[in-house]
Image: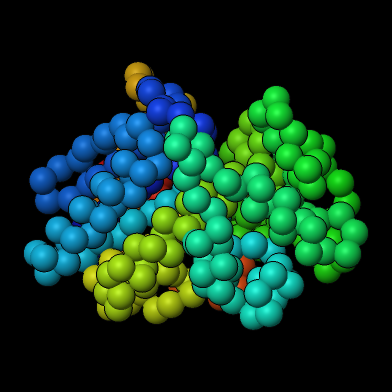
């Protein structure tokens, strides 16, 4: 499985215009070399991705776009929310509901609270880093609804010294990914709809021949290499190193093992269980 370019996106759910460490970061690796760029807002980042996909398709090339947030939720959530055991059904459900506000904020907290209310007792989402509370969204973790797990199988597989990714139910706190997931999925849902049928969301759709493949990534798999970097903002270093590793594996036609397994309901982290291959690609 080969791609002309690899892009890695480090997403942010922060309010306002991000700068430096608080920016959205996009790393690109391909025939022209490597580049990283800082993007201030989610709206600007979506515009940048639209331009990137349009250029890829106009050139008749292939692009792997890795995004640093979860593409799915633990087994049972999709069916409870949408009536279908399908992560893409959750994408379609979230897309019209999680929207941007005039101050570069997001409605994701209200949407999480509304989802919580659909469960008989406590809903799964928790965490709020803002001073103002959101009714129905507890600040501290409570019990999960019956049948829902704390983590997906892929998060357990990604444990490799860097620590396991946080639960998608946690929306605030150090390392939390829940808010990024709620704000990022709607963007990918729009990209997938806008450029259909050229875009495949892995592992929910076949990735072998699609011109553009969307995949969940976890740059902390390369935490040793990121830590060893001499300079740079951590998020910038992460997207640069992971895009480099993936494009090198692509050039050797060695990406197929990373795509071999994926849970069609929960999603999967591309590279989980294959950290050694990613590190070896960087070492060459």
Residue 125 located left or right of residue 12: right
Q: How many marks?
A: 0
Q: Quadrant of residue 3?
A: bottom left
Relative to 204, does residue 248 appear above or below in the rendering? above
For this rendering, which residue is in front, 25 or 112? 112
Identified at 20% across, 40% down, the residue is 34
- Residue lying at the far front of the rendered structure: 102
- Give the x, y percent position of residue 89: 56, 74
Q: Quadrant of residue 209?
A: bottom left
For this rendering, which residue is in front, 1 or 118? 118
Residue 21 located left or right of residue 64: right
Identified at 41% across, 60% down, the residue is 188
Identified at 49% across, 75% down, the residue is 204
- Residue lying at the far top of the rendered structure: 231
- Give the x, y percent position of residue 219: 46, 43
Q: Quadrant of residue 201?
A: bottom left
Identified at 15% across, 42% down, the residue is 33
Q: Is residue 276 visible in this depiction of the protein?
A: no
Residue 195 located left or right of residue 12: left
Relative to 105, does residue 275 appear above or below in the rendering? below
- Give the x, y percent position of residue 241: 34, 39
Q: How is the image coloured?
A: rainbow
Q: Is residue 45 visible in this depiction of the protein?
A: yes
Q: Which image quadrant: the N terminus? A: bottom left
Q: Which image quadrant: the C terminus? A: top left
- Give the x, y percent position of residue 254: 32, 64
């Amino acid at each position: 499985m080969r791609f002309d370019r690899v892009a890695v996106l480090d997403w942010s759910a922060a309010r306002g215009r991000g700068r430096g460490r608080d920016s959205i970061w996009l790393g690109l690796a391909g025939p022209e070399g490597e580049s990283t760029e800082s993007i201030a807002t989610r709206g600007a980042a979506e515009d940048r991705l639209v331009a990137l996909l349009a250029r890829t398709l106009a050139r008749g090339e292939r692009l792997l776009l890795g995004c640093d947030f979860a593409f799915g939720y633990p087994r049972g959530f999709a069916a409870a929310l949408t009536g279908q055991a399908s992560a893409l059904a959750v994408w379609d459900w979230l897309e019209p509901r999680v929207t941007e506000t005039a101050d570069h904020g997001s409605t994701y907290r209200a949407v999480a609270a509304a989802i919580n209310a659909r469960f008989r007792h406590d809903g799964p989402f928790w965490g709020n880093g803002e001073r103002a509370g959101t009714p129905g969204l507890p600040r501290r973790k409570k019990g999960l609804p019956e049948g829902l797990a704390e983590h997906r199988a892929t998060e357990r597989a990604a444990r490799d010294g860097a620590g396991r990714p946080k639960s998608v139910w946690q929306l605030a706190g150090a390392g939390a990914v829940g808010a990024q997931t709620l704000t990022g999925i709607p963007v990918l849902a729009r990209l997938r709809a806008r450029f259909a049928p050229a875009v495949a969301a892995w592992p929910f759709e076949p990735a072998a021949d699609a011109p553009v493949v969307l995949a969940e990534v976890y740059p902390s798999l390369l935490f040793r290499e990121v830590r060893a970097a001499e300079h740079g903002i951590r998020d910038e270093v992460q997207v640069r190193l992971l895009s480099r590793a993936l494009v090198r594996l692509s050039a050797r036609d060695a990406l197929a093992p990373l795509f071999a397994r994926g849970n069609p309901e929960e999603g999967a982290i591309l590279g989980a269980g294959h950290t050694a291959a990613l590190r070896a690609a960087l070492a060459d």
